[in-house]
Amino acid sequence: MKTLDFCNCLSAVRRMLAFASAGAAALVVAGCAGIKDQYAASADAQQRMAAEAAADTKAGATVDTQATYLKLVEQMQKEDLWFASLAHIDALERRWGVSPESTRVRAEALRQTGQAAAAEASYQRLMGTPLEGFGYRGLGLLAGARGNYPDAVQFLRQAQHRAPTDALLLSDLGYAQLRAGSIDEARLPLMQALQLRPDSTQAQANLALYLELSNQQEQAAAMMDANRMSSAARLAIKEAAQQLRRGRAVAPASPLATGMTVREELAPPLVLKASRSSNLIGVRTATRSNPVANAPSTPPSPISTSRDTP
């Protein structure tokens, strides 16, 4: 009887061990399957992340390339390569489409190459975009080139509201006000322009013209002395002031003028300059050989930094 009981117990133990082994095996299999599934899910997630990162990198590279091309166009325009820049703007827009930035540089190139109607249409297309300030400024410069200075003042005021610290824009506004007969109103933007950019020959010339027109000849002479203006530049400013006092129009501005200033309207004839880059064929756009524009940068004049404005 005891032997039978022992055998029964042994059989029970064997069954328990068998069940335990099966359970352990099942747990091991389940554990391996879980780890395998976890690794698979992790691999899928990593692949998705890698694909998204690659897409972001590609998109970023596209934006960088477009931005780099736009900077290339802007650099060409700084070097007065306006006609060549138009060809590159065509290529830029063909690849990436029209944008406010490409419209802005196109409008500038059209204005600088004497295509006023097309430039005006491009400036108009900037309205309602983040660059509409550039549009108003361009329309103001076009109006000034036509001799319509009251309209130029209105457009430039709109531009100035959107860029209140742009020194050259303030100088353009002040000059347009002088030409429109609003001499007293021109004082503020012209003083602001010179104090913001004391090295700007455009701001210097326009403020000197204001001082001449407001019968402050001594201060005008002191400012021109401090900024070492050439005798030709001084003569141009004085002649412009005399013509405006007599109610006569100053010599018409060239369509290639970059802004409104006495130096643009009384400058010598246009001359062609060789390209600065040896790998560019042809001639650069016409630029002015102007003593005021080429005057060396000097410390600001006493008038431009004094709190006692004229």
Image: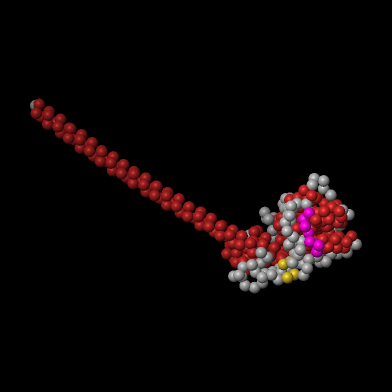
Q: Is residue 97 above or below residue 161?
A: below
Specify the segment rendered in magenta: 226-233
Q: Quadrant of the N terminus?
A: top left
Q: How many marks?
A: 0
Quadrant of residue 200 within the rendered picture: bottom right
Quadrant of residue 23 within the rendered picture: top left
Q: Is residue 179 left or right of residue 138?
A: right
Residue 166: percent from the left, percent from the top?
72, 53
Q: Is residue 32 above or below residue 10?
A: below
Q: Nearer the viewer, residue 104 or 197?
A: 197
Residue 229 belongs to the span the image colors magenta: yes
Residue 142 belongs to the span the image colors magenta: no
Q: Residue at x 45, y 50 (%)?
A: 49
Q: Residue at x 89, y 60 (%)?
A: 245
Does residue 272 appear in this view? yes
Residue 170: percent from the left, percent from the top?
76, 54
Outermost residue toward the right? 246
Q: Residue at x 15, y 33 (%)?
A: 11
Residue 69: percent from the left, percent from the top?
59, 62
Q: Is residue 160 left or right of residue 2?
A: right
Residue 33: percent from the left, percent from the top?
32, 45
Q: Is residue 178 left or right of residue 58?
A: right
